[in-house]
Image (tube, rainbow, N blue to C red):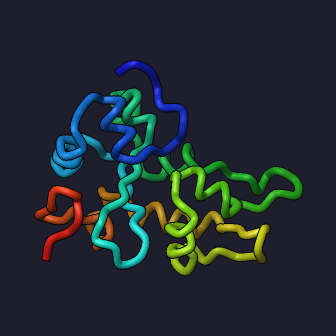
């Protein structure tokens, strides 16, 4: 690895470049359990999986191997209710930047995230953020979203 990833979460292409491995190999490593802190942020009915990796695990896997999901959520999403004038959660644009989502992808997640507010003041409450991270974590064996498909095509779309 040439240097640490600076953002909190990164996509599979970034992980592929940093580790010098193919995207297919990264998928195999995820499916085998090599990477624990990975989320499927796919929005809508798309068959393509949009994975987000916690950069701290990519940068130093041993440092986060004993973390719990609660610990990871606390590290990734700051609590703000102790700061006067702040709400406990993230603004729409902060959440989008955190997970490196496109505007259309975030729009498709609006209902699940229960985004509140008007136009330029959209907000995602912390409780909804925590639920999102728990539900979409690939280590969550109870979630259909977290489960990895058994077969994939060359462009990583689900096969029926």
Q: Residue at 23% of width from left, 33% of height from top?
A: 21
For the question of whether residue 129 can be seen, the reply is yes
Tell which residue pokes out farthest to the right in this image: 85
Q: Nearer the viewer, residue 93 or 127?
A: 93
For the N terminus, the quadrant is top left
Give the total of numbered labels. Answer: 0
User: Residue, x 24% and y 44% (percent of image)?
Assistant: 23
Q: Does residue 33 show up?
A: no
Residue 84: image location, x then y, percent:
88, 54
Above or below, comparing residue 136 to residue 35 in the picture: below
Determine the residue located farthest toward the top in the rendered image: 2
Give the side of residue 50 with respect to residue 96, left or right: left
Choose top left, top right, bottom left or bottom right for residue 142: bottom left
Q: Looking at the image, is 133 positioned above or below residue 74?
A: below
Q: Position of residue 90 (x, y in %)?
A: 68, 59
Residue depicted at 13% across the width and 77% down the height:
160
Left or right of residue 78: residue 132? left
Q: Position of residue 76 (x, y in %)?
A: 55, 46
Is 38 on the left-hand or right-hand side of 97?
left
Please give the name of the residue rendered at 53% of the width and 62% of the height, measured from the top-left corner. Answer: 130
33 versus 105 height, above or below: above
Q: Is residue 136 above or below residue 45?
A: above
Measured as percent of width and height from the top left, residue 129 is found at 56, 64
10 left or right of 47 in image: right
Q: Quadrant of residue 15?
A: top left
Splitting the image into 4 quarters, where does residue 17 fall? top left
């Amino acid at each position: 690895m040439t240097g640490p990833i600076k953002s909190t979460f990164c996509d599979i292409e970034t992980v592929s470049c940093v580790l010098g491995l193919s995207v297919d190999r990264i998928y195999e490593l995820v499916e085998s359990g090599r990477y624990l802190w990975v989320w499927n942020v796919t929005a809508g009915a798309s068959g393509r999986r949009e994975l987000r990796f916690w950069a701290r695990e990519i940068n130093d896997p041993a440092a986060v191997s004993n973390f719990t999901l609660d610990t990871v959520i606390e590290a990734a999403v700051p609590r703000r209710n102790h700061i006067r004038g702040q709400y406990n959660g993230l603004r729409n644009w902060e959440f989008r930047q955190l997970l490196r989502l496109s505007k259309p992808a975030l729009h498709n997640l609006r209902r699940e995230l229960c985004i509140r507010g008007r136009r330029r003041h959209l907000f995602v409450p912390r409780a909804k953020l925590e639920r999102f991270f728990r539900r979409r974590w690939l280590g969550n064996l109870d979630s259909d979203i977290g489960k990895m498909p058994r077969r994939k095509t060359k462009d990583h779309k689900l096969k029926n």
